[in-house]
Structures are given as C-alpha cells and as structure tokens.
Image: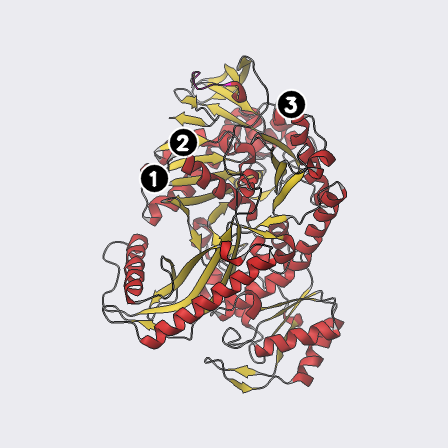
Amino acid sequence: MDATMYLISTDTGGTFVDTAIVDADGELFVGKAPSTPHEPAKGLLESIDAAAGRFGESVSGVLSKCRLFVNGTTVTTNALIQRKGTKTGFITTAGFEDTLLIGRVRSRTAGLDAMEITDYRHAERPDPIVPRDLIRGVTERVNYQGEVIASLDVEHATRVVDELAAEGIEGLAICLLWSFRNSVHEQELKKLVAVRHPHIYVTTSSDLVPVIGEYERANTTAINSFLGPTLQNYVRGVEDVVSSTGYGREILIMQSIGGLSPASELAERSVTSLHSGPVGGIVAAQKLGEQLGEPNIITADMGGTSFDVGLIVDGAPQTASQTIVERNILRVPAVEAVSIGAGGGSVAWLDEVGAIRLGPQSQGSYPGPACYGRGGTLATVTDADVVLGYISADYFLGGAMKLDREKAIEVVNENIAKPLGISVEEAAFGIYRIANSHMGDLVRQMTIERGYDPRTFTLVNFGGCGPTHCTGYGPEVDVKSSVIPSAATVFSAFGIGQSDIRHFSSRSLRPMTIIRQGEPVDSSVAEEVNEIVLSLSDDMREQLQRDGVPGDDGTFEIHMELRYKGQTNELTIPVLADLPIDQAHFDEIVANFERQYEMLYGKGARSTLSALELITIRVDATVTPPGSASTISRPRYQESGDPLVGEREVYWPDRGYTPTPVYRGELLTSDQPVIGPAVIDTYGTTIPLHPGQILEVDETGNYYVRH
C-alpha cells in the first residue's frame, strides 16, 4: 500500500472541527466534530476519526499514511476576541509611548456595523492590546530618510527591557519611528532581549511589517506578540498529537492571505493566521468557479459563529492591504472576507423596545445552542431552525449527534415568544428572517455598494448553516445563480487542502515618491522601485528555500499601493510586469488605479490634475505543495438508495406546519430535480426548499437552487 496515500485537510472553527480526507484515487471523505477550545487537538482527532471511519480507517491509520496535513484555525482569532493572549510589553521611540492609545480617527469606527456607527455611543477606540503601564520609550532616533540622528542608548534600553521582564511579560513588541527605513535600532533591541531574556517572544515591526503608518504598524506588531505564544502552543499541541499517531512531516497552516505556511514559519507571524478558516472557503470557491466556468463568485460562509462574505472577480479573490479584526486595524494583506455575527450559534435577544436582535454574542460549541443539550439557555439561530423543522433533530451530523427539539422550543418561547406575546413558531421564523435579512444586506454591501452587479455573480453557499439559510435570503439578492457545493459542510477545510504555499514581503518607499500623470516617471523613482521589487523577490526566494522549495519554482506577483497626493487611504493595484518595470508599465499602473478608483467612488471621481503617490510595494510568492488536492470530487457517503426517505413537519409562512417530503441529498442524481416545499438533508447541513423553489444536482454533486 502507498505509504503516503492521504491528504488530510482540517479547519478548527469556533463551533466545529471540519475534516476532508482525499485518498490516492481522488475520493473525498468528510467528517465533523465539536470544537474543544481548551484541548484543541482532541476535537481535531475526533473530526479526523469521523471522516476516516467512512472508509474503515482509524486515526492512526490515515495519519501514518498521510502525504500532507494542512490546518486552518481560529485559535488566534478567538484569543484576540477574548483578550486571552500573552501578557505583552511594547517598546517605541521615547516621546511616542501613547501611539497605541491615540490610534487614528478611523479607529473610532473601524469594525462597527452601519447601525453602530449611527449610534455615537459606540464610536470609541478599542482598548489597546498592551496596557499603558507595559509601554516604554527608548532614547534613539532615525529620520524619514533612514539616517541615524540619535544612536540607541543601550544602557537605558537595558533598563527598560529588564523592567518589562520584571513585570512578567511573555511577549514583547518593538516598533520604533522610521524603522522601515532603517531597522538597526530595532535589531539591536531584539538581540538585547535574546541575550538577557531568551524566554520572551519578540516581534519587531521591521521584521513583520516594514511599512509606513505609525499606528497600524505598531498595533500589528503588538498583536503579533500578543498572539504568538498562543499560536506556538496550539501548533506544538497539534504537531505532538499527529506525530505521535504516525505523521512524520511538518504541518502546514492556512494564512489570511490565502495560502499555506509551514507551522514553524507561521509561528513568528501569528497575526497572519487570523481568519484562516474563512479564507479556505474562498479558495475552494475559486477552484469550483474554474470548474463551472464562473469567474465571478460571491462566497457565503455561515458557520456556528459568523456569516462571512467574500468576492471573486474575474477568477481572482479580492484582497486588502490591511484588515480589521475585532476593531483592530492590522497592516497585513489578506483575502477579504467581511463578517457579521450571524452564525448558527448567534444569540437572539430583545432590545429595549421589544425588537428581535441577533448577535454578536455566540454560544459557540460549549454550551452551544440549547438544542445541543449542553446547558445552553439562550435562543440561537440553530434553535430556531430546529423549531421550524429546517434542521432535523434526528439526522444532525448524519444522525451521529441527536438534538433536543423540546429544549429549542423552550428557549425560543421563554426568551422571545412569551415576552412578545406571539407563538413559538412565529418567534422562530422571526429569528430566521432577521438572520436572512442581515445576510442579504451584507451580500448587497459587498456587491452593489462596491460597484458590482450581483446579476453577473454566482452565489456559492457553504458552511454548516449556509445552505440552511441561502434559500431564505437568496431570492432577495438577485444573483445569476445559487450553488451549494457537494462538500458544503466542510468546504473551507477542503479549500485549505487545495491551497498553495504563499508568502509576502512588503516595503514602503521614502515618503512623497510621486508619479505624475501624463509625465514620465523620474529615473530615480523607477530605479528605486525596481531595486525594491528585486530585493523583495530575493527575500521570497530565500523564504521558499527555507520551506524546502526551490526559489525559482515559485510564482511572483507584484502589488503597489497608491493614492492621490493629499489623500490618506491607498488602493492596491496588481502589477502585471516582469523586471524592469518601465514607463509603459507605469502608465498601465496609473490607468488601472484610475479604473479602480472610479469603480469604488463613481464615474468621474478620478482627478486628472492630482499626482499619484506610490507608498508601498508588496511581492507575493506562491508555489503548489506536493500532494495538494487539485479537483473537487463528490464526497463519499452511501453507495445507493432511494433519496426520498419520508416526511416531517416543517413550518412554511402562510401554510404553518406542513408534512413535507425529506430527501437525502447524497443520493440525489442529476435526473432527479426536487420542487419545493421539501427538505434536503445531508451530512452536516440541510437545505429547506421553500414552496416554488427548484433544486437540481449536477454530475459532481453540486446543488443548484432556482428561486
């Protein structure tokens, strides 16, 4: 037997751990298990066991014959949300100790939804990740040109480092002024800490984010040190477990940028692992779009905690040069996935005027929705779905996990129905409709408000709850078509297994580097740009070599961040050019900037008189790891059988509870369309087909819904 016949791809979410196993013949087997936040490896193994059991294998059996083990995780996201990272200190240039506390004006509203922004009571800066008493300044100064105008006072710096160590810090962030132009003092401090306090996890901004933007750079550096030891402990625990059961290679972890990284490398850049799970789903949707011939895709991922939407335009996922996580502005690029608190575990509650509100608080996996029977007492979206009959209490996770429908009825009644004086089913359907309205609003925000016509996009719905709700809000968003992938319940996990190894390196130019429209680029600017691109490319080749990949095997992409002179926000423009970048390339860069600017801000918004400032250059390197999955196959569950398995009482508006046909989705074939009302149960998710809706299946098991 082939000693390396399996690809194991896992996604550790806030509610469930998802697993996709692909064997040597390309067959796909999936499994899910509840997350175990206090013992992450336990839930991981249980999920792998659920998938392996489908073809008669054990956990040790599949791991000992595993050719590649990849993982996406929410461990850093959860640590940031709950503020349960490492006690962290922060060192900056003397006189600038309040950078994290002051933030920027936009930090007052970053990450708030539209309703919260209108309520100015919420417009406060997030509390800095490092408290003021753990922030210190050191005597040094580098100017904007990178010239040292005041050397680092080593004696003073030693006292500062020792003071913070005495406070019991385990992480230290170092971010000095203009260090992205000259990192000498940051590196001196880093060596000083390594000698005197080697147990402290250190991040320097010049190693992590050598780019302009004092607050964003400082905040990103601080959060990286806050999360670093947490990610290291998680990775160490997973590696210990999988290696003890037979896997002998380094695991790869998904990054927010949309690619994998060896765990040892990512442990130094923990901040790039935020949102790694949702990004896996976008990668899988991109691959699915290639197979279906659909270049424009809206991804709709609804799990237990959140609802995440991403865009794929002309076959490429949309990315951002900086991201916002828990209201923190982070200066790291990422595939863009906008989230709202509308997952299956999101709590429904009544505000002061008696209106039903949803989230952002979630019950997660423990105690989870009340129907899980683990002590939950609050009404959630999943409880409402169970009350309505959209989710079967007897066939959850293919029957492996029984749900308590009576408990769901009880909490919806006590928390929502009784206070409002309405029936339980009316309250449950109200929760369902409100969740759907939030989702439809986010889809429109990501398309119409950005200048895209949703009628030219295919909506790809996945996650454990995504298919359950897409038939509710889908008719409102007016998309070209709506697809539920055959592996929808573990789609993000499978996307992680399809991902490339990906790294990035960024550097900001000297301020006020200007590209004047209609004029040739100054030769000194062109020379500096090409030197930076070459240097960043060399950095990426060295990185790939550390990963065990020949540097020349990688694909390199150049991105430039530009803005009109006098503005404060940049647009990221991809550069399709080989070195050297010449005048023709710069002309095309300007034209692309203007096109993107008008798409975002309206036709005629561009300025023909303003000069452009080139602020930052980024180079991405990608390479396909040996053994990754290349195609999406239909998951293997059962060999044959009648897809119509019976009826159950399901609530439909204007009809009430009605005996409704129930189908096993895995047994449907392309010649068996289903007309609603009906319910399609699958392993890990369910599709309530509302009256008049039609569901069809293609040859690879993807479900198409016509509204």
Identify the image quadrant of the C terminus: top left
Foreground residue among 548 and 97: 548
Left or right of 442: which side holds 183? Answer: right
**What mark, if any, has residue 143 been given in the picture?**
none
Left or right of 444: which side holds 94? Answer: right
Left or right of 642: which side holds 607? Answer: left
Mark 2, Cα crowd under 10 Å, few <14 / some 14-19 / many 20+, is many
* Distance between mark 1 and mark 2 Cα atoms: 11 Å
Identify the image quadrant of the N terminus: top right
Q: Amino acid at mark 1?
A: Pro
Mark 3, Cα crowd under 10 Å, few <14 / some 14-19 / many 20+, is few
Q: Amino acid at mark 2?
A: Ser
Residue at position x 72%, y 52% from top? 236
Residue holding disc 3: 399
Asked whether the residues under the numbered discs 1 and 3 touch, taking CB atoms below 8 Å apart as contact, a structural biologist would say: no
Query: Percent from the top left, x then y, of residue 305?
Result: 57, 41
Query: Percent from the top left, x then y, of residue 180?
Result: 51, 73
Q: Magenta stretch?
A: 668-672
Residue holding disc 2: 482
What is the secondary structure assignment of the residue under circle 2? strand
* Distance between mark 3 and mark 2 Cα atoms: 27 Å
Residue holding disc 1: 454
Which of the marked residues, 1 or 3, is nearer the chain's N terminus?
3
